[in-house]
C-alpha cells in the first residue's frame, strides 16, 4: 500500500510548482526555508546549513485513496543537514498542496513544519501545530 500512496503523491507534485517547506525550531527560533518537490531541500536562515531529505507516506487519506482526497495523508519526513544534524518529522496533509507536522532532530531539538504553495501563509503558520 505504501507504494500506491507514494505514486499518488508523486503524480500530484509534478503537476504543481514546488511547494514552500518551512521548519521552525521551538526553542531557538531557528528557521529552515526551502521547497518540497519530489524531495525536501531547506536552508537554515541562522547558519546557512543545507538539509536534504525525503517524504514517505504512512497513512491513507480520509475516505480512502482517490484523485482529489489528499486530506489526512500522513507521512514521515527525514532529512540530513550538512552541519551534521539529522531530523525526522511526522506530517499530515490538510489539502492536496499543504500540510503540517512536528519532529525532533538528532540534537533533541523540537521543531514544527509547514508546507504549502503560499509563502505568507507558511511564515504566518503558528509554530504550535503538531501532528498527534
Image (cartoon, rainbow, N blue to C red):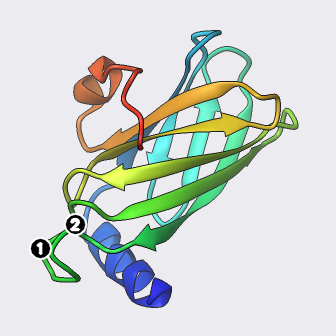
Is 125 situated above or below 13? above
Give the numbered dot on residue 23.
none
Marks 1 and 2: CB-CB under 8 Å?
yes
Say what secondary structure mark 1 lies in. Answer: loop
Give the numbered dot on residue 70.
2
Instruction: Give the position of the C terminus as an image quadrant.
Output: top left
Percent position (x, y) of residue 83? 85, 32
Percent position (x, y) of residue 68? 11, 73
Q: Is residue 65 visible?
A: yes
Q: Identify residue for label 1.
A: 68
Question: Relative to 114, is 41 on the left or the right?
Answer: right
Is 64 situated above or below 118? below
Residue drawn where x is 64% and y is 55% of the image: 53
Residue drawn where x is 30% and y is 24% of the image: 125
Percent position (x, y) of residue 20? 38, 41
Q: CA distance from mark 1 to mark 2?
A: 6 Å
Q: Is residue 18 visible?
A: no
Q: Residue furthest top?
A: 28
Is 124 situated above or below 42? above
Instruction: Give the position of the N terminus as an image quadrant.
Output: bottom left
Say what secondary structure mark 2 lies in. Answer: loop
Q: Nearer the viewer, residue 88 or 15?
A: 88
Amino acid at each position: 500500500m505504501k507504494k500506491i500512496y507514494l505514486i499518488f503523491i508523486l503524480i500530484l507534485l509534478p503537476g504543481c510548482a514546488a511547494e514552500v517547506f518551512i521548519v521552525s525550531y521551538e526553542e531557538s527560533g531557528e528557521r529552515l526555508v526551502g521547497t518540497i518537490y519530489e524531495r525536501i531541500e531547506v536552508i537554515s536562515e541562522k547558519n546557512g546549513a543545507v538539509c536534504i531529505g525525503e517524504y514517505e507516506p504512512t497513512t491513507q487519506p480520509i475516505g480512502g485513496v482517490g484523485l482529489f482526497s489528499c486530506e489526512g495523508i500522513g507521512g514521515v519526513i527525514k532529512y540530513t543537514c550538512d552541519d551534521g544534524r539529522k531530523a525526522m518529522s511526522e506530517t499530515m496533509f490538510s489539502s492536496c498542496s499543504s500540510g503540517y507536522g512536528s519532529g525532533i532532530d538528532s540534537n533533541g531539538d523540537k521543531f514544527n513544519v509547514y508546507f504549502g504553495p503560499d509563502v505568507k501563509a507558511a511564515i504566518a503558520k503558528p509554530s504550535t501545530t503538531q501532528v498527534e
